[in-house]
Image: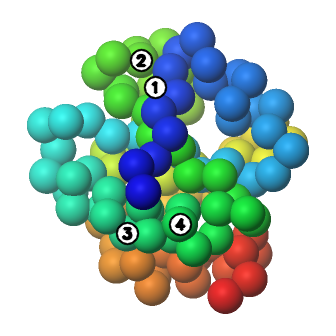
Amino acid sequence: MALKTVTDVSFDEDVLKSDKPVLVHFWAEWSGPCRQIAPSLEAIAAEHGDQIEIVKLNIDQNPKTAARYRDLPIPVLNVYQCGRVVKTIVGTKPKASIERELAAFIAT
């Protein structure tokens, strides 16, 4: 399952105004760790998409949003709820570790 892509234009509507938590994968095509974590995020989205939306934002193509929310090395996963960041996960982690980090948002 491919993740939905958000952009500078769609970020506020797709992420900040969402009725459910949204995990945003800040990524770049040139980043090996970003490519490595993508299959885990796609699997989590397929399994828990009814509880948490998982989307991706290319930092090179969307510099305004990237600058506004990302001041850490990529990959960075921010969980947004009610228009604000409520959880940040930094770096490449296995799927089970990401799911543990998201336990407050998903029922496993």
Q: How packed is label 1: few (under 14 Cα within 10 Å), some, or many (20 or more)?
A: some
Residue farthest to the front, as pictured:
1
Q: Residue at x 45, y 82 (%)?
A: 97
Q: Would residue 77 appear left or right of 40 to someone viewing this image?
A: right
Q: Residue at x 19, y 36 (%)?
A: 29
Residue identifier under label 4? 46
Q: Identify the mark at residue 40; answer none if there is no mark.
A: 3
Q: Kindly identify the amino acid type of the residue bearing the numbered disc 1.
A: Ala
- For the residues labelled 1 and 2, say whether their Cβ atoms are less than 8 Å apart: yes
Q: How packed is label 4: few (under 14 Cα within 10 Å), some, or many (20 or more)?
A: some
Q: Nearer the viewer, mark 4 or mark 1?
A: 4
Dot 2: what SS?
loop
Of the two numbered discs 3 and 4 on the same chain, state the one appearing first in sequence: 3
Q: Alpha carbon of mark 2 to alpha carbon of mark 3: how far? A: 23 Å
- For the residues labelled 4 and 1, say whether their Cβ atoms are less than 8 Å apart: no
Q: Give how far across and how far down residue 63 sits, in percent.
A: 40, 16
Q: Kindly identify the amino acid type of the residue bearing the numbered disc 2.
A: Asn
Vertical side of 32 occupied by 99: above or below: below
Q: Nearer the viewer, mark 2 or mark 3?
A: 3
Dot 4: what SS?
helix
Q: Alpha carbon of mark 3 to alpha carbon of mark 4: how far? A: 10 Å
Residue identifier under label 1? 66
Q: Alpha carbon of mark 1 to alpha carbon of mark 2: how far? A: 6 Å
Q: Would residue 36 appear left or right of 12 to someone viewing this image?
A: left
